[in-house]
Image (spheres, rainbow, N blue to C red):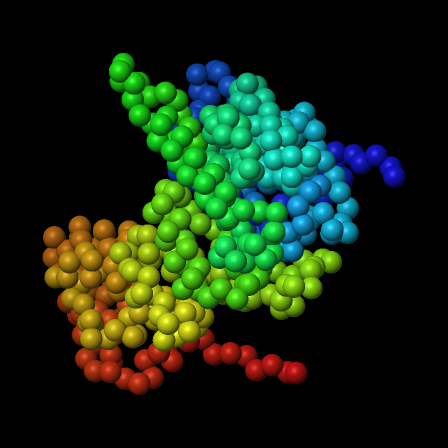
Amino acid sequence: MAKMTIKDKLALLSDAAKYDASCASSGTSTRGSRDGKGLGSTTGSGICHAYAPDGRCISLLKILMTNYCVYDCAYCVNRVSSNVPRARFTVEEVVWLTTEFYRRNYIEGLFLSSGIIKSSDYTMEEMVRIAETLRKGGFRGYIHLKTIPDASPELIERAGLVADRLSINIELPTDASVKAYAPEKDPAGIRQAMGKVRLTKEDYSDRTHTGRRRGNFAPAGQSTQMIVGADAADDATILGNSTRLYSSYGLKRVYYSAFSPIPDSSSVLPLVDPPLMREHRLYQADWLLRFYDFSLDEIVTRDAGGMLDLEVDPKLAWALANRDRFPVDVNRAPKEDLLRIPGFGTRIVQRILKARRSGALGLEDIRRMGGRVRAARPFVVTRDHHPGARLDQADLRARFVKPKQMELF
């Protein structure tokens, strides 16, 4: 077999990393190089952002260190029984690639994941060496390390001291699914690793007797990724699990990755991929739970089979099911009621609260602030608008549902 070039490895291992969705870089601390020391920054202009055909952000150099893996997870294209080409970067190759891409402003940082080779500690040690070498070389960009759950706490601590964000995949919505599809992985061990990251971060945040913190451990926090649609878990189960992860482990984000059939897939997996709209609705619902004070029971109910409505977004679905809560007077209602109006985001609500101190607002005022008036119109009262009996119309929901194109076959 001919020796692979670094370009061949990059093509193979960047493609293998496309199944990792955890690539947001928000929330990290600011680092710059205006003092003449170091290289690059976490902010600034000229940073390139690109999106894969499936909509995922690829603004980071997102690669696997290797797609060799000793595990045999049914949903993973890199499982040991999969018949795919294999490659492996050395530590020096990843450092060189990242630095050169960064110098050319192709990327704003590095997202590094890996298959598990030899052992969890061996793999984690290699990944930590990459991040540490980059930092020693003055690299000021963003680093996201996908950590190995079974790695030793000492390695996780070293990783957190050089990376902006750490993430550990929860893999699937339920423990039973993890045991069925990824028998080598331990759901309790994964959660335990998340708990250690949280405790270590809190430990580093505590101030010493001199008033200084011990260090900056994973400033962008930790996240996780959950595959949706590979098992029979409904949306209520998925969101319930996410809610527990946010509250118990202080996660910054739970990413939902719609299962897609992979080459040479296992026979235990479904043959049809779930709609990407389901992934999108889960993100919308996740947002409502965290920033809009909705409870899980309000967003998804067992009456609907525990599934979100794919035709309308979760907030609009709630508003249509709770019409007695509307219309809301935009010029008088408290913040918590404004946040429940379809078409109003948190920023729009803040602008409304500020602007209405100067006078009563109309629909055009809200439109200029960025509100989606078409979605809000049936649910609000403004200076120049009252929905009248529109809220009681039986076809109100149909006005928000996009017509479906007839299939030819």
Judge by depth and name the residue closer to the eye, 58 or 165.
165
Q: What is the x, y in percent for residue 237?
A: 42, 62
**Rendered view: 75 above or below 199:** below
Figure quadrant of residue 112: top right
- Left/right placement of residue 72 relative to residue 139 reads right
Q: Quadrant of the N terminus?
A: top right
Image side of residue 312 versus residue 356, left or right: right
Q: Residue at x 59, y 57 (%)?
A: 180
Residue at x 60% of width, y 28% of height = 125
Seen in the picture, residue 279 relative to 46 is either above or below; the reply is below
Q: Residue at x 15, y 58 (%)?
A: 334
Residue 31 placement (x, y as % from top left):
43, 26
- Residue 394 in view: yes
Q: Is residue 162 visible?
A: no
Q: Residue furthest bottom?
A: 394
Exactly how many numbered labels are in the figure?
0
Residue 283 in the figure: left or right of residue 40: left
Counting from the top left corner in percent of width and height, residue 86 is at 75, 42
Q: Nearer the viewer, residue 138 or 188?
A: 188
Q: Quadrant of residue 261?
A: bottom right
Dividing the picture into quadrants, the one containing residue 58 is: top right
Determine the residue positioned at 42% across, 28% down: 217
Q: Residue 379: horizontal and vertical position, in percent?
A: 24, 71
Q: Quadrant of the C terminus?
A: bottom right
